[in-house]
Image (cartoon, rainbow, N blue to C red):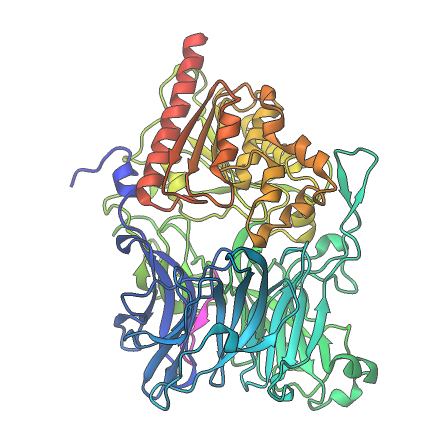
Amino acid sequence: MNQSLPWLTAELMTRPSRSLSELRSLEGEGAGWLAWHERRPEEKGRGVVTARRPDGCLVDLTPPESDVGSAIHYGGGAWTFRRGRKGVETFFTTRRTGGLWRSLEGGRAECLVAAEPHVRFADLALGSETLFCVCERDETDAEGKILRTVMEIVALSVPEAGEESIPSQKAGALRGVAQGADFMMSPRPSPDGRFLAWVEWDFPFMPWTATRLCVADLAAGQGKSPARTVLLDGKPQEVFQDSTDTTSWKPVQDTGTSTIEPFWGDGETLYALTDQRQPDQAEAQRHWTPTAFRRSGMQGSETQPERLKAETGWERLLLPPAPAEIGLPAWVFGQRTCLALPDGRLLARGLKDGVAQLLCFTPDAASGSQSNTHPVAPGTRTGGHWQQVYVPARPAMTPGSPAQGISGQPESVPVPLGTGDLFAWIDCPDDQPPAVVTGPLLRGLPSCEEGHGNRTETVDTVRQAWALPQNLTPADLARPRLLTIPVTEGPGPLRAFYIPPARGPYCTGLPAGKQAAENGRPPMVVIVHGGPTGQARAELSFKVQWWTTRGYAVLEVNYRGSTGFGRAYREALAGRWGLLDVQDCLTAAQYAIDHGLADPQRCVIRGSSAGGLTVLAALAAGPLFRAGTSLYGVTDLRALAEDTHRFEARYLDGLVAPWPAGEATYLARSPLSWPERISQPVLFLHGGCDKVVPLAQAEALHARLPDSQLHLYPDEGHGFRAPETLADALQRELAFYESVFQQADDAG
C-alpha cells in the first residue's frame, strides 16, 4: 500500500469518525453490560446508544429512527438504562423532536412523553422505577413568541417493560420535583430511592462560578414537590465593583463556590465536587475536589452538634483535598469524573497541571467508609489518603514498533464492570484514536516486558472512533510537551502544550521558504481554545496533526481562565477577557521563540468562538503574529451580550462587565471597535446557521479589514461538524498561511 505524503490528507479527514462519550455500566443483575453514546457521521451524525453485552457482542440499544441527544444548552445526558426481567431498557430523548422514549434492547421506541415544540429534556437518571430529568420549557404568547423560559426537575413513574404499559402524556402532566432556580442539572436519586440530589444556579452566574447543592426527601413530598435542603450555597455577595475608569470593571474579592457532579455512595452518603475553601486551605489552593454529606441519624451521629442537624438534617464530612482538580466545566450535562466504588473507596479522573491522572481515595479504618461507625465532626476532615492509580495503555500502533504511551488516558472516570477488578473507560491518549476499552485498575505504573514494546497487562479494545493508516510509525505522530512558563503577576505559572513537527517517513519537512533555509526553526501555529472557560488537552487531534505532519509546530495555550488548574487560575479571567488571555498567548509564543522552538518570522495564531476574539486582539497587540484565523469567532461583544442563547445570556457579566451598565467596557474590548489596529492578514471562516455568534459579526469586521478573507459554510452552525467542512477549512487555512509567508519572502 502506498502512503500519501503527508499521511494526514484531506481525504483521510473526510472518512467517517465516530464520537464516543458518556460511558456507563450496569450493576447487580445487569453486571457486564457496558453502554455509551456515539455519533455516526455515516448516518448524518445520528446519536445512538451502543452497548457491549456480557457475551462481548455489540448491539444498538436505541432504534434506527431515533437520534438520541438533548437540545438543552450544548446537550449531554440524553439517555440512561437499566436491566429488567424482559431485558435491557433504554430511556432517552431525541435531539430534533424531543419527548421521552423507551426502547427494549433496541426495539421500537415507546413514547412516554409526547414531543412538544417548546419543551426539551436532558440529564436523565433512574431511581427505583422513577425516571428523573431536567425539563426546559418555553412559555409563549398567542403568536408563539417566547416570553420566558423555565427549568425544573421532573419525575415519571416507569415500571418495568412488560409489567404494565406507560400511557403517553404531555410534559405539563409530569410531577415537578424541584423548581425555582434559573438553571438545574445533575438530578441524582439515592440507591434506595428516598432522596434526590441536584445542582442549581441563577443568573448572572455560571455553573463553574456559583452553584447550590440541594437534596430533597422524596418520601416527605406526599404527592407534592418535596422541600429542598441547600447543603452548599455558593452565591457570592457581589460580583463586580465599578472602577474610576468607565471602560474597566474590576472583580471584588471572590467568595463564590462552584459545586458540581453529585453522586451517591449509598442511601445515606452523598458526595459532590466543590471548590469551596477548606478551613486550613489557602485561597490560591482551591480546586474542585470531593466532599461528603451524611444523613443525620446514622449510627454514631448523636455526637454531632444539634444545631447543624436541626438546620439541614445532613452532616458535612471534609475529605482531604485531592492532589489534582477533579471536575470539568459543565458545558454539557452528564459529565462524570468521580464515583464511589462498592468497597467505600472513591475513584476519580483529575487534572494536574492540565495533564490527566487517575486518583483513588481510601478512607482510613478509623474514619470508615459507607459502614462508618466513627463519626467525624462537621468542619473537620475524615481520615484517608489519595493515591495515584493507573490503567494500562493499548498496544503499540504497529507490530514490532516501540511502545508509545505507558498508561491509558481516560477522558472521564473509568466505570467498574461487575465486582472484580475490571474497568472500562474511553481512552484518549496522544498517540492513538479515542476508543472504548476495558482493563484492570493498577496501583503502579504499567510494566513492559524487558526489551519489548508489548505490555504485560491486557487491554481489550471494544470500539474505536476511527483508524490510523496501518503503516504509520510512531515518529509520524507528534506528541505534546508540557511547557511551564513564568508570569510576573497573578496566579501562575502559565501552561501550554508544545507539539513539535513530526519527523516520520510519512511527514513532510519544514515548509519551503527563505526563512526556513536561514534558521531551520519551524513555523508555529498558536491555537487558542474556545470557551473561554475550557482547556487544551493532550490527546491525539487531527487539528494538531494536520500542522505537525507538514513541518509546523503547534502551541496550545491554557491561558489563565482555563480549567484544570484550580479556581484562582480559572477566575483570573474575571473581568479581563480580551486582556489577560491575549497577554498569555503572547507570552507563551515569545517563550517558545526565545527557547528556539519556533521561527520568530513565521508565527501565526488561530482560534474558534471565544478564541477568535483572542486571535484578533493578539494581532492588534503587535507584530509577533504574522497572520490569524478566526473560526466563527466573536468580533462584537455588545452584539453577543444582546443576542445569544439562554445558557450564556449572562456569561459575559463575569468575563467582561455587568451588562448593560458596563457597555463602555464591551465597546473597548470588541475588535469591531478598532479595525485600524489590525494590520496583519486575517482569515474568517464562519457558518451560515450560527446562532451563538451570528455570521453578521464576521461580515462586519471583514468589511473593515482590507487584508482579510471571509469564507462561508452555509449549512454549518456554531462549530463545524461535517468532515468535508473540517477538511476544507484546514486546506484553506494552510494555503492562507503559506501565501502570507511567501509574500514576506518576496518582499524581503
* Residue positioned most to the front: 142
Q: Quadrant of the N terminus?
A: top left
Specify start and end residues of the magenta stretch as a single range: 412-424
Residue 513 among those drawn in magenta:
no
* Prevailing secondary structure class for the magenta stretch in the rendered image: loop
Look at 57% across and 54% down and name the residue there. 646
Which image quarter: residue 363? bottom right
Work out whether residue 534 or residue 552 is closer to the camera in this orientation and state it. Answer: 534
Which image quarter: residue 27? bottom left
From the viewer's perspective, tell me whether residue 453 is left or right of residue 494: left
Instruction: Please determine whether, in this image, residue 676 is positioned above or below residue 52.
Output: above
**Residue 513 placement (x, y as % from top left):** 38, 16
**Residue 122 placement (x, y as % from top left):** 49, 66
Which image quarter: residue 228? bottom right
* Residue 551 in view of the camera: no
Residue 419 among those drawn in magenta:
yes
Instruction: Please determine whether, in this image, residue 598 is positioned above or below residue 468.
Output: above
Look at 50% across and 68% down and name the residue there. 123
From the viewer's perspective, tell me whether residue 612 is left or right of residue 95: right
* Residue 518 in view of the camera: yes
Look at 76% across and 55% down and name the residue there. 283
From the viewer's perspective, tell me whether residue 733 is left or right of residue 677: left
Instruction: Please determine whether, in this image, residue 248 is positioned above or below residue 80.
Output: above
Tally the marks.
0
**Residue 423 placement (x, y as % from top left):** 42, 71
**Residue 697 placement (x, y as % from top left):** 52, 34
Work out whether residue 473 or residue 516 is closer to the camera in this orientation and state it. Answer: 516
